Amino acid sequence: MLRPDGPSSDVRRGLDLGRPPYDPPVHADDELIAPPAGARVYEERHRVGPADVTTAGRMRLDEIARWLQDLAYSDLVDAGLEDVGFWVVRRCRIRVERFPRFPSELRLRTFCSGLSPLAAERRTTIDGDGSAAEAVAVWISLDPETRHPARLPERFRAAYGPVAGSRRARGRLRHPPPPEGAAYTTWTFRAADLDVAGHVNNAAYWEIIEERLAPELEGGLDAEIEYRAPAEAGIVSVLTSGDRLWVADGRGEPHASVRVAAVPREAR
């Protein structure tokens, strides 16, 4: 599915979507679970706008990531939990069978699918008008004062725990480090990419993947980002090897790592 450059391939440069997953648990299908009986499911409807899409009209990955983030926060507000600590995303996987397109109106549903002492796993489904996308993310709870990992507040567990507590949220890093000889380029994060925490927002990293996708790509994409260390505005290194990508600082220490794979046609 990939090409070094040129206008007609699914991906522009730098990643090999045709390779099998490096680590099967990274893309284990048991992550993409349906809401169990009794789960709190929060739902909204969103319309794909002109600023959300490529020149070919398909929704960009970075905008999907922003929808996921906003939906998660809206669920907390709806549950009366917007004040229960501070959250950062540890890992996010987006599997797209068919990209949303302008100007479709879509249904978004999210629920808490797992808990651990410091983390919560969240599942989200986006569908409607032929679109089909699934996401799973692990969020880490931080103390709002120290910004260090903190145990999930009891109010959060009371709202989500009776069902989600039967499944463990796993925040351990599982992507490999960049290998020797990885291809090298750079990327510039802007001040506009920073969020209220003062570091690059998680959705901005998806722009690096999006830059490597063709505008007309319809679907069949499974991508995951692990967030390791916060980045500030400025130039970062981008290392690629096969179906892997790393966003690193000047010393080569990763801010984030990326795994991208094609979804087999028979699985769509």
Image: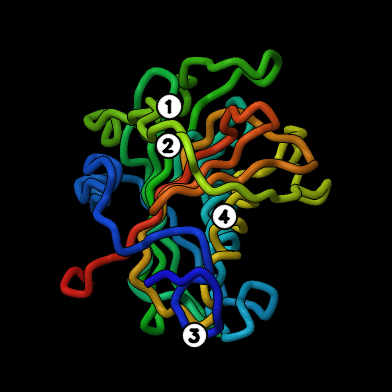
Mark 1 and mark 2 residues within 8 Å of each other at the beta carbon: yes
Query: What amino acid is found at the position of numbered circle 4 in the picture?
Result: Trp
Spatial CA distance of label 3 from label 2 is: 35 Å
Spatial CA distance of label 1 from label 2 is: 7 Å
Residue 248 located left or right of residue 16: right
Task: Give the mark nearer the N terminus: 3 vs 1.
Answer: 3
Query: In the image, is residue 62 above or below residue 238?
Result: below
Q: Between tags 3 and 1, which lies in front? A: 3
Are there few (<14), some (14-19), or many (20+) residues within 10 Å of tag 2? Answer: many
How far across and how far down the image is residue 162, in percent? 28, 31
Q: Which residue is mark 2?
A: 138
**Colour treatment of the image:** rainbow
How far across and how far down the image is residue 61, in percent? 53, 63
Query: Which residue corresponds to the image point at 44% horizontal and 20% vertical from the top-left?
Result: 118
Task: Give the mark nearer the N terminus: 4 vs 3.
Answer: 3
Residue 191 located left or right of residue 244: right
